[in-house]
Image (cartoon, grey):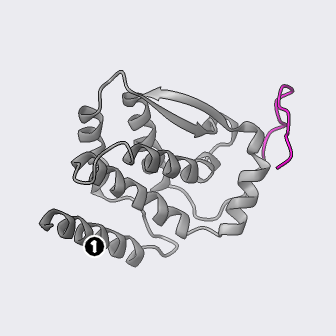
């Protein structure tokens, strides 16, 4: 019970500190990014984690914006793999909160529309845990240095892309 109360307090403080700093010059990244190393060490190196993403070569700095929501969903799925009192789950929730804070600074409708325009560029893969957590760190580090306004122009869809309705 004490652990749950402590976790809730930590998450609330983290969320409040991120919200207080969420102006134009706000930074959703805290020193908690260094905790990724702990997660990386706690999860077996040969464990594969599903990820839905767009390579940054296709969209420049827009890759942070376009990948923030899919990464958040991937982390939520990963967190569900751990029990309620797992320290790994607690650590993952911190990174989910960071990504949510990043998205709260963006115009939701513009983000959704941009993700739709880039839909043909998303890829589904499974990455080993080391590569996955390196990606999480790179995205969060890049988010700390990006402008909050975004105008993303997609390259043409690959010829092999088939758009299915719905």
In magenta stretch: residue 164? yes
Q: Which residue is mark 1?
A: 13
**x, y percent for residue 33:** 32, 50
Q: How many marks?
A: 1
Q: Main secondary structure of the magenta part?
A: loop
Q: Estimate how packed mark 1 is, as few (under 14), some (14 to 19) or many (20 or more) residues with alpha carbons within 10 Å.
A: few
**x, y percent for residue 12:** 30, 73
Where residue 48 sits, quadrant-wise, is top left
- At mark 1, the secondary structure is helix
Left or right placement of residue 125 versus residue 34 in this view:
right
**Which image quarter holds the N terminus?**
bottom left
Residue range highlighted in magenta: 154-166
**x, y percent for residue 147:** 57, 61
Q: Nearer the viewer, residue 54 or 30?
A: 54
From what the image shows, is residue 139 above or below residue 125? below
Residue drawn at x 36%, y 71% as measured from the top left: 15
From what the image shows, is residue 101 above or below residue 164? below
Left or right placement of residue 123 versus residue 9 in this view:
right
Left or right placement of residue 99 versus residue 53 in this view:
left
**x, y percent for residue 133:** 39, 37
Q: Nearer the viewer, residue 14 or 87?
A: 87
Left or right placement of residue 52 versus residue 100 in this view:
right
Residue drawn at x 72%, y 65% as measured from the top left: 110
Residue drawn at x 42%, y 63% as measured from the top left: 28
In magenta stretch: residue 108? no
Q: Residue furthest top?
A: 46
Residue drawn at x 46%, y 73% as measured from the top left: 22
């Amino acid at each position: 019970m004490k652990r749950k109360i402590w976790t809730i307090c930590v998450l609330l403080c983290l969320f409040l500190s991120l919200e207080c700093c969420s102006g134009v010059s706000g930074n959703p990244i805290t020193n908690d990014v260094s905790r990724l190393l702990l997660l990386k060490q706690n999860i077996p190196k040969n464990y594969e984690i599903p990820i839905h993403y767009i390579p940054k070569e296709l969209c420049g700095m827009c890759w942070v914006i376009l990948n923030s929501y899919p990464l958040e969903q991937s982390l939520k799925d990963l967190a569900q793999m751990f029990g309620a009192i797992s320290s790994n789950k607690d650590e993952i929730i911190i990174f989910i909160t960071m990504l949510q804070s990043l998205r709260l600074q963006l115009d939701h409708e513009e983000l959704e529309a941009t993700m739709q325009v880039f839909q043909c560029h998303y890829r589904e893969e499974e990455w080993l845990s080391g590569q996955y957590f390196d990606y999480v760190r790179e995205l969060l580090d890049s988010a700390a240095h990006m402008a909050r306004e975004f105008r993303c122009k997609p390259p043409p869809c690959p010829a092999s892309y088939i758009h299915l309705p719905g």
